[in-house]
Amino acid sequence: MLYSMKEVCQKTGMNYETLKFYCNQGLVPNVKRDGGNRRVFDERDLAWLEGLGCLRRCGLSIKEMQHYVQLCLRGEASIPERKVILAERRKALEEEMARLQSALKYLDDKQAFYDEVLAGRRPYVSNLLPQK
């Protein structure tokens, strides 16, 4: 079955402009065209687009995604290089998650402090105000 760009957008959650941009940037190789010269996509294209969306959410730039596509087009021989790219991205995501966890802990601690102050269980102190 072939899908129109609109149908692909509905299935993937990708907006039309992004899908068109990805196609124009060569991120969707071998795009097929219907009789009216409109882009159409099959199930394999949909799976590829889902992967591209994930790579983008992982923080790969368009240039990095283009490089990844070129590696994929080289076939099995490029798997070791692709694994390096994914491992590096994974490490960066783990570091970002640690930063975000630290930020969440700060917010949770601050909320708990405010709750205790508002409940009268703890005196209010501020690093910005003179101590009484």
Image (cartoon, helix red, strand yellow):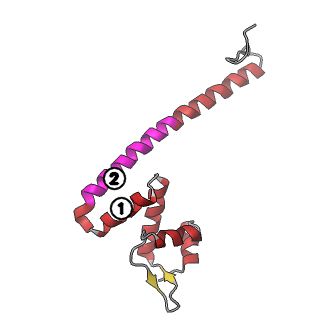
The quadrant holding residue 125 is top right
Q: CA distance from mark 1 to mark 2?
A: 10 Å
Three-letter amino acid code of the residue under disc 2: Ile
Local packing at callout 2 (Cα closer than 10 Å; few below 14, some 14-19, many 20+) is some
Find numbered disc 2 in the image and state the secondary structure of the residue it sits on.
helix
Residue positioned 43% across, 63% down in the render: 51
Local packing at callout 1 (Cα closer than 10 Å; few below 14, some 14-19, many 20+) is some
Vertical placement of residue 119 versus 36, above or below: above
Which quarter shows the C terminus? top right
Which residue is the site of mark 1?
67
Per the picture, the main secondary structure of the magenta-coloured stretch is: helix
Image mark count: 2
Could you tell which of marks 1 and 2 lies nearer the N-terminus?
1
Which residue is the site of mark 2?
85
Find numbered disc 1 in the image and state the secondary structure of the residue it sits on.
helix
Nearer to us in this view, 36 or 121: 36
Determine whether, in the image, residue 67 is placed left or right of residue 97.
left
Q: Is residue 96 magenta?
A: yes
Determine whether, in the image, residue 123 is placed left or right of residue 89.
right
Determine whether, in the image, residue 129 is placed left or right of residue 62.
right
Nearer to us in this view, 119 or 21: 21
Q: Is residue 2 magenta?
A: no
Q: Which residues are magenta?
A: 79-99
Nearer to us in this view, 105 or 74: 74
Vertical placement of residue 61 versus 75, above or below: above
Residue positioned 54% across, 67% down in the render: 18
Vertical placement of residue 50 versus 126, above or below: below
Residue positioned 47% across, 78% down in the render: 41
Q: Position of residue 126 (x, y in %)?
A: 70, 17
The quadrant holding residue 68 is bottom left
* Number of the label disc, if any, that sits on residue 111: none
Three-letter amino acid code of the residue under disc 1: His
